């Protein structure tokens, strides 16, 4: 019994550390180090990114746990952030399937390792066309097929453009999952594995935490972070600046490295929305995979075997030989 | 309530069936009960462990449960349409079989929605459908449709039963007191007075007039749960009528099978005559042709225009390495075979017609599976970067156990109801036998 407790504690500590590390790296240097405190060193080191861009190792005992973002009321969570119109631009020419976005998203939302809100597809539009990596999160459509079909208003469209889910209300009918043409939504088929301290957090549709069994969830564009003026973790984690996130009303988007005009970006780079013909009016724009920065094969070769397995049937796309179809 | 001699004879003949819940009935009841218990155990596991124990996953979010829901609820709509039409058109030969059709209506509208509850991730939150209803959702339409239809089926069956119930009440049956009381209560004091007769017939006619369009509406709404989405194979303008026809067709099959079964079980050859099988066979033939025509239109237009996802789906459905054999079974056994067997005079007999109806009903179940699962396996974006077991659907034992439990519940209700009221209604029954039939079929 006692031993069990210890294990549980160390596990919790580990997860806590992981959470801190994410927050710390994500906020790019707002190092939550309280060096003045007289805590005894815990012995486990955590790698962090310093404000000057160096990797530093710090004992986990010297870190302050940064709580998840502030919780707004259910009503506020349904209305959205006044005056905003969130938009994302994904630069396909820069994606090499590094999957840092996925890892960051998983950590931020306490997703189990294999239950992703964000996936990367290997697409090839036609036989002679070039293959490219295609990160896909929720498109937060302006004409969302998922919201249309929800029988209990558990998934809703906000004035700031976001489509969110209230997992306190969701009945788990999965109609929205069947209706989403982009297969964006995921379901908690089993009791979600969550760290103990996360399990008891107050739930908000803006954080999506804690997940609940028998309910639907998906990418939420991290409105809790937006309220604090922070970019979503996927945007910040991407080593190549693939994702630009911002506000259509302000006409600015940022990938963490540069802040640019949204209109100019999609005009100059011929931005488009995926499957425009479906009439869903996505809030995510893609920049065509022109002048790709990385050889597309590397995204496959560098991935670990479990990830490679997921693309097994599509490996031919990468090969020199023309696919049979 | 006065019966004429023909009706009286019919009642006396069936009297023992409602007086005694015999050994055979008990045997089946226990068997069905056991099936249901296994299903309940599967349900317990599903509640305790989550839907992870089913074969459903993020891509194929609906499986056997929804297939069963469409199947059973379709039978229900079929029963209402068939019973409604037979009643409204005062089809004399239809009188003995109207009750079976109404049984089917009520029982399936009870069993069908159970499968929706099984499919829903949080059935502890079903009240959300009523406290947070969102009228734009086809699922909300379906909730309203099913609730309305259930109420309609209860009334429709009850009204049709009132005269008979008053007969049972007054017949001095050798039955327990509670059963007598139930008859008395349900007969609502019907004595056959002129005003009672008039009110009853008006309400029955009204219910029939309501139930037919209602069944068409609710079957269409059911189809729109699929038709309103942007998925290949679902997003089709003919889905409403396709589902209506599919429902009536499979329901016609179940009715033939039920007729055959009760004819054997209760020796009702005198009431469920060869003519009934022949006529219902004709109806089945026409519906088969209609259903075949719809199916052909669906597949042919998708295949010919060959849009990306449609052709992917068609390929899946017809490729023998995927669903090809099932598609063939659904169309050969589900459409071609019933047409052939009814069309050829030599096989136009109760036995072959019932057998082919039985196979057709199974084929129509498979057809529903082919409507649901392959479409969900055909995602618009390629199914990459997903776990291998999320790509294909394969039902697990709890899903099968609950499916069997559903069928057992359906049959259990039939058993119980056939012991509560006579399978062939006695009041209003008309003698449609030819002299020849009377000669051949004389009972006892």
Image: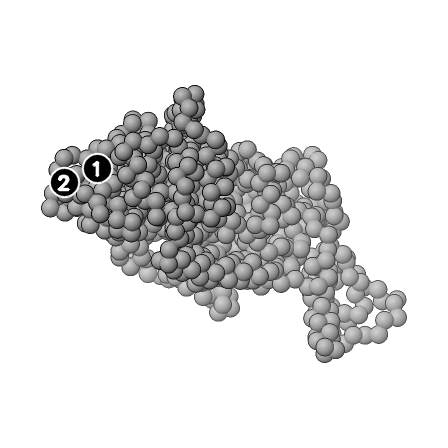
Q: In the rendered view, would you say A253 is above or below A300?
A: above
Residue B78, x across and y down, in percent: 35, 38
| N-terminal label among 2 and 1 | 1
Query: Of helix, strand and loop, which one carries label 1?
Result: helix
Q: Residue at x 19, y 43 (%)?
A: B442
User: Position of B277 compared to B251: left or right?
Assistant: left
Indicate the secondary structure of the residue bearing disc 2: helix
Q: Which residue is mark 2?
A: B439
Task: Residue at 73%, 43% (x, y): give it.
Answer: A73
Report whether A157 appears left or right of B425: right
| Image height of A124 relative to A150, above or below | below
Camera-side residue of A158 and B325: B325
Q: Chain of mark 1?
A: B
Left or right relative to A200: residue B301: left
Q: How many marks?
A: 2
Quadrant for residue A27, please give it.
bottom right
Where residue B70 appears, as percent x and y from the top left, is: 40, 45
Q: Mark 1 sits on what residue?
A: B279
Instruction: Please determine whether, in this image, residue B227 is positioned above or below residue A65.
Output: above
Q: Is A246 on the left or on the right of A299, as rendered?
A: right
Could you tell me how far apart the alpha carbons at marks 2 and 1 are, in whole angstroms? Answer: 21 Å
* Closer to the eye: label 2 or 1: 2
> Is residue B94 visible from the viewing direction of this image?
no
Q: Are marks 2 and 1 in contact (CB under 8 Å)?
A: no
Q: What residue is shown at x 18% (from left), y 43% (from top)? A: B441
Characterize the local packing of mark 1: few (<14), some (14-19) or many (20 or more) Cα atoms within 10 angstroms. Answer: some
The residue lying toward the viewer, choosing from B131 and B284, is: B284
Outermost residue to the left:
B346
In the rendered image, the quadrant that contains the N terminus of chain B is top left
């Amino acid at each position: 019994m006692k031993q069990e407790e210890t294990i549980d504690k160390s596990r919790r500590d580990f997860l806590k550390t992981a959470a801190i590390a994410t927050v710390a790296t994500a906020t790019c240097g707002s190092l939550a180090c309280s060096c003045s405190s007289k805590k005894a060193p815990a012995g486990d080191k955590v790698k962090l990114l310093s404000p000057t861009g160096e990797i530093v190792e710090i004992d986990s005992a010297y870190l302050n746990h940064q709580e998840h973002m502030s919780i707004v009321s259910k009503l506020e969570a349904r209305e959205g952030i006044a005056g905003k119109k969130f938009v994302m631009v994904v630069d396909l020419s820069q994606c090499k399937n590094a999957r840092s976005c996925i890892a960051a998203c998983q950590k931020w939302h306490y997703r189990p390792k294999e239950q992703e809100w964000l996936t990367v597809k290997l697409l090839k539009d036609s036989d002679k066309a070039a293959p490219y990596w295609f990160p896909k999160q929720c498109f937060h459509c302006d004409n969302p097929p998922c919201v249309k079909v929800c029988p209990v208003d558990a998934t809703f469209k906000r004035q700031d453009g976001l489509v969110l889910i209230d997992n306190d209300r969701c009945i788990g009918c999965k109609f929205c999952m069947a209706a989403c043409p982009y297969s964006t939504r995921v379901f908690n088929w089993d009791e979600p594995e969550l760290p103990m301290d996360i399990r008891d957090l107050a739930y908000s549709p803006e954080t999506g935490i804690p997940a609940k069994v028998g309910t639907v969830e998906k990418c939420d564009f991290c409105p809790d972070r937006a309220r604090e003026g922070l970019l979503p973790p996927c945007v910040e984690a991407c080593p190549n600046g693939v994702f630009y996130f911002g506000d259509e009303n302000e006409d600015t988007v940022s990938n963490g490295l540069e802040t640019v005009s949204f209109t100019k970006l999609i005009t100059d780079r011929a931005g488009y929305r995926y499957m425009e013909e479906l009439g869903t009016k996505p809030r995510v724009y893609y920049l065509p995979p022109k002048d790709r920065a990385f050889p597309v094969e590397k995204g496959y070769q560098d991935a670990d075997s479990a990830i490679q397995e997921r693309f097994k049937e599509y490996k031919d796309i990468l090969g020199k030989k023309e696919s049979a179809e | 309530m006065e019966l004429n001699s023909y009706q009286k004879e019919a009642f006396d003949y069936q009297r023992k069936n409602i007086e005694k819940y015999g050994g055979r009935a008990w045997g089946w009841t226990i068997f069905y009960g056991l099936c249901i218990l296994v299903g309940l155990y599967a349900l317990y596991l599903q509640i305790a462990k989550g839907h992870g124990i089913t074969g459903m996953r993020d891509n194929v979010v609906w499986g056997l449960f929804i297939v069963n829901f469409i199947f059973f609820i379709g039978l229900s709509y079929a029963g209402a349409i068939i019973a409604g039409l037979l009643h409204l058109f005062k089809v004399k030969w239809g009188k003995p079989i109207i009750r079976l059709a109404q049984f089917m209506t009520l029982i399936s509208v009870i069993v069908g929605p159970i499968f929706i509850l099984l499919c829903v991730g949080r059935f502890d939150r079903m009240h959300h459908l009523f406290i947070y209803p969102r009228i734009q959702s086809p699922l909300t339409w379906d909730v309203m449709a099913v609730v309305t239809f259930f109420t309609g089926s209860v009334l429709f069956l009850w009204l049709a039963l009132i005269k008979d119930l008053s007969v049972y009440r007054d017949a001095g049956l050798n039955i327990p007191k509670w059963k007598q009381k139930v008859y008395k209560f349900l007969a609502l004091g019907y004595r056959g007075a002129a005003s009672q007769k008039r009110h009853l017939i008006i309400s029955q006619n009204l219910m029939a007039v309501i139930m037919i369009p209602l069944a068409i509406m609710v079957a269409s709404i059911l189809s729109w749960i699929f038709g309103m989405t942007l998925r290949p194979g679902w997003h089709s303008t003919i889905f409403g009528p396709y589902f209506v026809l599919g429902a009536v067709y499979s329901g016609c099959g179940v009715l033939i099978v039920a007729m055959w079964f009760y004819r054997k079980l209760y020796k009702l050859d005198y009431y469920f005559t060869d003519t009934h099988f022949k006529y219902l066979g004709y109806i089945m033939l026409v519906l088969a042709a209609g259903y075949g025509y719809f199916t052909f239109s669906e597949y042919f237009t998708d295949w010919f225009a060959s849009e990306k996802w449609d052709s992917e789906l068609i390929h899946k459905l017809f490729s023998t390495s995927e669903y090809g054999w099932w598609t063939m079974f659904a169309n050969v056994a589900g459409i071609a075979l019933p047409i052939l067997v009814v069309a050829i005079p030599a096989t136009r007999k109760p036995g072959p017609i019932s057998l082919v109806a039985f196979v057709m009903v199974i084929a129509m179940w498979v057809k529903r599976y082919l409507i649901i699962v392959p479409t969900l396996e055909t995602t618009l974006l390629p199914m990459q970067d997903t776990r291998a077991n999320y790509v294909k659907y394969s039902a697990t034992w709890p899903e099968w156990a609950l499916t069997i439990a559903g069928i057992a519940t359906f049959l259990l209700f039939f058993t119980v109801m056939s012991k509560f009221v006579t399978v062939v209604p006695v009041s209003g029954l008309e003698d449609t036998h030819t002299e020849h039939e009377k000669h051949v079929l004389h009972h006892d």
